[in-house]
Image (tube, rainbow, N blue to C red):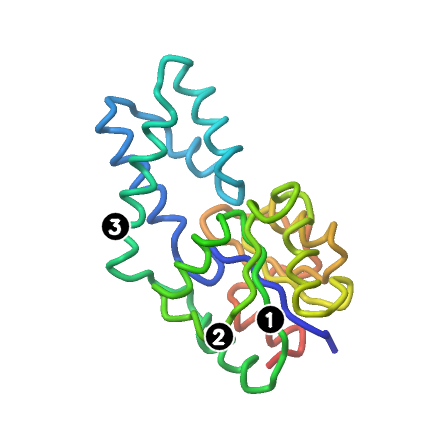
Amino acid sequence: MFAAVLFDLDGLLVDTERLGIEVSNEVLATFGVTVSDDLLTSMIGHDEVESLRRLQAATGPDFDIQAYEAARQSAVRARMEQGIPLKTGARDLLEHLFTIDMPRAIGTNSRTEAGLRKLRQSGLGDLIHVVVGFDAVTAAKPAPDDFVAAARQIGVNPKNCVAFEDSEAGAKAARAAGAYVVQIPDILPTQGQNADLVAKSLLDGARKVGLL
């Protein structure tokens, strides 16, 4: 049996990846810029520093990346204030883990405060209290730092944890942390090269590892 459960956030518990791509396209249009969906989906699982590096490489040095990012973040916050949809099974699984007193924490490539805000806005704020964002550690995913720090904050060794992830960068990070990795693809498909188990949904993965 696992000692604790580690989670990613975006694209796993909250359905924010599609929202993020939609908002990014809308904001880019206000700057007179169009990029491919392939570029935007390639940013999934990466922190904002790496995502902006990729966008700058595609748009060129004359594109005001900082002005764009400020506008994008403002637009994302406004959209999320209307409510954030959950991924299927997210509340059911978290409530079950709460009921059985299974420690749970989030390691995310969002900033820590942004992660906490998303939990509040999605109605999951009372079910997970430990959130470690990329800004709280030395290196973002695919480095294992945020999962290692999240496990430490709930008093467990990550090697005794099961980690749920959707992205390749996240699955690689969880594996490097030593956790048993359950990957549930969101927008991007996976071959599962960084996962111990690929599942169709959170509840499917939880059942297969004995959490349900």
| Nearest the eye: 45 or 109 | 109
Q: Residue at x 42, y 35 (%)?
A: 40
**Vertical side of 185 occupied by 57: above or below:** above
Image label count: 3
Alpha-carbon distance for marks 2 and 3? 24 Å
Alpha-carbon distance for marks 2 and 1? 9 Å
In terms of sequence position, does the residue under pointer 2 or pointer 3 come before the other?
3
- Give SS at disc 1: strand
Q: Which mark is residue 128?
A: none
| Nearest the eye: 31 or 37 | 31
Q: Residue furthest left?
A: 30
Amino acid identity at mark 2: Leu
- Neighbour class for label 2 at 10 Å: few (<14), some, many (≥20)? some
- Neighbour class for label 3 at 10 Å: few (<14), some, many (≥20)? few
Could you tell me residue 55's position as x and y percent? 43, 26
Q: Residue at x 45, y 48 (%)?
A: 187
Could you tell me residue 11's position as x and y percent? 46, 55
- Neighbour class for label 1 at 10 Å: few (<14), some, many (≥20)? many
Query: In the visual, does 39 lie left or right of 2?
Result: left
| Nearest the eye: 78 or 177 | 78
Q: Residue at x 33, y 49 (%)?
A: 19
Amino acid identity at mark 3: Ala
In terms of sequence position, does the residue under pointer 2 or pointer 1 come before the other?
1
- Give SS at disc 3: helix
Q: Which mark is residue 78?
A: 3
Residues under numbered marks 2 and 1 in contact, where contact means CB atoms less than 8 Å apart: yes
Which residue is labeled 2 in the image? Answer: 127
Could you tell me residue 138's position as x and y percent? 66, 42
**Vertical side of 25 occupied by 133: above or below:** below
Which residue is labeled 1 in the image? Answer: 104
